[in-house]
Amino acid sequence: MLAVVGPGDTDDAALLAAAAEVGRLAASAGHDVVTGGLGGVMAAASRGASEGGARVVGVLPGDDPAAANEWVDEALATGLGQARNAKLVAMADAVVGVGGSWGTLSEIALARRLGKPVVWLHGWTITGPDDPVPLVSTPAEAVRFIIAATTA
């Protein structure tokens, strides 16, 4: 399962289009997709994955599964608030970040701590002591990176 994470409050058309394309490409590569289940990048990636035929899981911060966007097939209402980011990342085999926000940064960091393959599309430059988070510039590059990292 591929996690697609990113800001829920963005209306940046280019970012939303990129997230939808990541979802579609992930689906066409045979991956189901998990997101935070709400709006913005999460909704766009959910839509793209759903249109591509993938199963979409939404890991929600609140208690109400009805809060999930319309493309979520399975809504997991955690009641954990932002701590749900750990659950979301733990469910995934790999993580694609699309765009930057503090919540997205937390998901990227948690994924790195869990040893999951991570790539960031239109994200922030984050460098660790020896291991910068890879940045890519297109949805196709992001999905190619994740496929290579999960099949190697």
Image (cartoon, grey):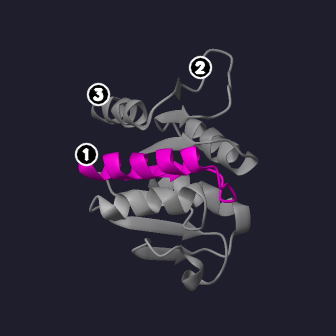
First to last magenta residue range = 1-29
Q: Is residue 145 above or below residue 109?
A: above
Q: Identify which amino acid the numbered label 3 is placed on.
A: Ala
Residue occupying image coordinates x 63% and y 34%: 123
Badge 3 is on which residue? Answer: 152
Badge 2 is on which residue? Answer: 131
Which quarter of the image is occupied by the C terminus?
A: top left
> Which of disc 2 and disc 3 is earlier in sequence?
2
> Which of disc 3 and disc 1 is earlier in sequence?
1
Q: Is residue 150 left or right of residue 11?
A: left
Residue 11 belongs to the span the image colors magenta: yes
Residue occupying image coordinates x 49% and y 49%: 17
Q: Secondary structure at mark 1?
A: loop
Mark 2 crowdedness (10 Å alpha carbons): few <14, some 14-19, many ≥20: few
Where residue 137 sits in the image (x, y, percent)? 50, 28
Q: Identify which amino acid the numbered label 1 is placed on.
A: Ala
Q: CA distance from mark 1 to mark 3?
A: 15 Å
Contact check, label 3 and label 2, Cβ < 8 Å: no
Badge 1 is on which residue? Answer: 29
Of 134 and 69, which appears nearest the observer?
69
